[in-house]
Image (cartoon, coloured by chain):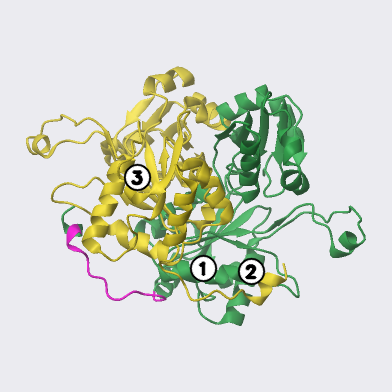
Chain colours: A yellow, B green
Amino acid sequence: MLYLIGLGLSHETDITVRGLETVKKCKRVYLEAYTSILMTASVETLEKFYGKEVIVADRELVESGADTILEGADQDDIAFLVVGDVFGATTHIDLVIRARELNIAVESIHNASVMNAVGACGLQLYQFGQTVSLVFFTDSWKPDSFYNKVMENRKIGLHTLLLLDIKVKEQSIENMARGRLIYEPPRYMDIATAAQQLLEIEEIRGEQAYTPNTPCVAISRLGSPTQKFKAATLKQLAEYDSGEPLHSLIMLGRQVHDLELQYLYEFCDNKEEFKAMVEQDQEFFKPPPYVPEEEEFSD
Amino acid sequence: MLYLIGLGLSHETDITVRGLETVKKCKRVYLEAYTSILMTASVETLEKFYGKEVIVADRELVESGADTILEGADQDDIAFLVVGDVFGATTHIDLVIRARELNIAVESIHNASVMNAVGACGLQLYQFGQTVSLVFFTDSWKPDSFYNKVMENRKIGLHTLLLLDIKVKEQSIENMARGRLIYEPPRYMDIATAAQQLLEIEEIRGEQAYTPNTPCVAISRLGSPTQKFKAATLKQLAEYDSGEPLHSLIMLGRQVHDLELQYLYEFCDNKEEFKAMVEQDQEFFKPPPYVPEEEEFSD
């Protein structure tokens, strides 16, 4: 049996009781360690907590070595640990499809991920549109495919969760060209970089998918003991010191409920100013005057 | 301290290790028992597993009795358990806001919820639009506010997660009018009812937000040992026997990746037929011919 087990967001104890019981009975335990990191636990911490060896699975192993991971899984129990929940990345889907082809049974043990835990900032999960990713810009490569998606979400009033780039075990172009297996230090995009990149693209595109005054929520170290939220405009966040990784960013949509706003006040420097920015931003993509449907009176 | 603790989806052991440790040290433990249910654990099972009393918190207590729940939480640790993750319902936000007003510290211990665990069906979470709710229709009340939202999602190609109604501890209108505290048996919307209601509204509205042939994924007992997915058209699901609760439904958007489709094949009766329906449905809301942007060649 192949067990896909979500580890949650931060502590070694964020694994579920059922997940831990399963890890303990597995013959081999892999940890997928390139799409995210567990914020307050190292591989050594996990090994000590589980009482067994943890094999770190990098991108090469997961994407090209599925058969190595699955070896013997028709007879033995193998655990594949994923930070957050188990289906955050397409490569994990690939692993399950390969297991199916080999007639290996698969069971998932779910956990929290940024996709649902962002609710902790007070914004309602059902008010979010599609999630987008923001990658590190280089001088020559500034991918902006997120821009149209943010625009689509905001046109229909929805919040957007932006997942920020993580670079783990990456080679420099020079080292790659020379075939040297030297890896760059890991990089995790912070809030200021994300906000600056967003502003840079708005400057280039100029279609006002958002503005420097668009209200956002910076999410830092979600689920860890030092978790922090900051509600501010994009321009303000471009100078915000978000501290240690990991970070994500939410750009607000037009549909901000009173309860959401009231909750966000806890995280902003100046309530009145933030409220004014939210109201100003709500003028964007405003639909025609709203007439409630008859049904809404009958509840 | 007030601890909000997610219980995950199904087993008593779906709580995290950190969540369990916290429950054990709390003076009082409340279980929010009206927005969802834990599928394979009863209150008695939980009490035995935690080794302490669990106070069932119904809607009245959570919405009107926040101060009862929070009593003494400035001195003692109080746990408030929520099926799934902690911020699934606005009433929990209310509880945190009330705690803040009373200067009571709050900590969340997250867990899986339907909002992220649906990834288990193979559809990518970042391809979902806003989530909608479908409530039980009555003869005189057929709320269709979901319809415009599904349309909005599908116009931009996104999948829609539909959460299906749960009625727990509801009074009949007669018993309510007579002030009799007699509650109806719990009701959980099944897939066939959901599909029939969707078709009924499309029949009335006729704006082709979807059609009887629109491909969907029925999700039953997500995260439980009897978890089941069924990929079929809406019309087919209107006659589908989905078995024991809980259920949710996904309506596909136009952006179905090959990998998603390949994964869904495992859950349909007839691959070729399902593929044809997906291709047919992709003709809806099709944008102008797609021209890749220059950046996409440079990755």
Q: In this picture, is B247 found above or below A135?
A: below
Per the rendering, the mark at residue A237 is 3
Question: Can residue B10 be seen in the rendering of this structure?
Answer: no
Label for residue B239? 2
- Mark 3 chain: A
SS assignment at label 1: helix
Badges 2 and 1, same chain: yes
Q: Do the dots labelled 2 and 3 sit on one chain?
A: no
Where residue B192 sits, quadrant-wise, is bottom right
B29 sits to left or right of A115:
right
Q: Which residue is tagged 1?
A: B150
Residue A291 place in picture, x, y as percent: 58, 76
Q: Say which of marks 1 and 3 sits in front.
A: 3
Where is residue A94 shown, x and y percent of the image? 36, 47
**Badge 1 amino acid:** Val
Say which residue appears at 81% left-offset and 54% top-offset.
B185
Q: Is residue B72 left or right of B109 when viewed as pictured?
A: right
For disc 1, the chain is: B
Q: Secondary structure at mark 2?
A: loop
Quarter of the C terminus of chain A within the rendering: bottom right
Q: Mark 2 to mark 1: distance in Å?
A: 22 Å
Name the one closer to the observer, A22 or B118.
Answer: B118
Q: Is residue A217 located in the magenta-colored stretch of the structure? A: no
Q: Is residue A155 visible?
A: yes
Residue type indicated by callout 3: Leu
Q: Earlier in the sequence, mark 2 or mark 1?
A: 1
Give the x, y percent position of residue B207. Answer: 52, 81
Q: Which residues are magenta?
A: B283-295
In magenta segment, residue B286 = yes
Residue type at tag 2: Glu
